């Protein structure tokens, strides 16, 4: 019978962590623990969705494999601010395309300023979304 906690250990080659500060190593351990707990929670959800009513709870190697695959797609979920930023970027890009009229831009200074502000906001928001996505 297992104890109250399961200790998970693994080795990381020193050459991979030589440039890391103590704080970075501590953060790496905490993130590893958090990622492991997320996989366990996802495995429980996978098992629950597959289990027939009244059947014994059993998480198999395949369940863990499915949980890792699902967790990898869900691990990078965006919060509502990121989603809102992306939506605003798309709306401003669409708006800048709709409002583009060379004659109005070149002949009307107010129209030019409004258009310039809209296109600048679109560029800034799009850049922010790309930076946050790591692209």
Image (cartoon, rainbow, N blue to C red):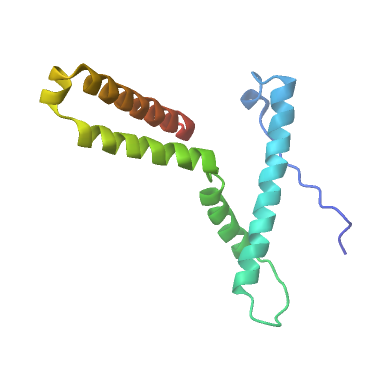
Residue 67: x %, y % from top left: 59, 58
**At 33% across and 34% down in the image, what residue appears?**
92
Residue 11: x %, y % from top left: 71, 37
Residue 51: x %, y % from top left: 64, 76
Residue 70: x %, y % from top left: 54, 56
Horizontally, residue 26 falls left or right of residue 43, namely right
Q: Does the rendering let one see residue 135? A: no
Indicate the quadrant containing the C terminus: top left, top right, bottom left or bottom right. Answer: top left
Q: Quadrant of residue 42?
A: bottom right
Q: In which quarter of the image is residue 62?
A: bottom right
In this rendered view, identify the residue nearer to me: 67 or 110.
110
Horizontally, residue 84 falls left or right of residue 66, namely left
**At 54% across and 50% down in the image, what residue appears?**
74
Q: Does the rendering let one see residue 90? A: yes
Toward the left, the furthest residue is 103
Picture layout, residue 3 above or below residue 72: below
**At 30% across and 34% down in the image, what residue appears?**
93
**At 27% across and 19% down in the image, what residue appears?**
113
Q: How many marks?
A: 0
Q: Quadrant of residue 79?
A: top right
In this rendered view, identify the residue nearer to me: 16 or 98.
98
Picture layout, residue 109 above or below residue 134: above
Toward the bottom, the furthest residue is 54
Picture layout, residue 31 above or below residue 102: below
In this rendered view, identify the residue nearer to me: 134 or 15.
134
Indicate the quadrant containing the N terminus: top left, top right, bottom left or bottom right. Answer: bottom right
Picture layout, residue 53 above or below residue 16: below
């Amino acid at each position: 019978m297992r104890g109250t906690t399961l200790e998970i250990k693994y080795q990381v080659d020193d050459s991979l962590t030589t440039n890391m500060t103590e704080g970075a190593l501590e953060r790496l351990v905490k993130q590893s623990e958090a990622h492991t707990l997320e996989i366990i929670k996802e495995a429980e959800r996978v098992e629950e969705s597959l289990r027939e009513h009244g059947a014994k709870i059993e998480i198999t190697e395949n369940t863990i494999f499915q949980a890792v695959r699902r967790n990898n797609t869900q691990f990078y979920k965006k919060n509502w601010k990121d989603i809102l930023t992306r939506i605003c970027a798309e709306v401003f890009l669409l708006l800048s395309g709709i409002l583009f009229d060379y004659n109005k831009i070149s002949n009307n200074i107010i129209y030019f300023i409004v258009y310039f502000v809209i296109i600048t906001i679109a560029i800034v928001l799009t850049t922010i979304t790309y930076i946050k996505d790591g692209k």
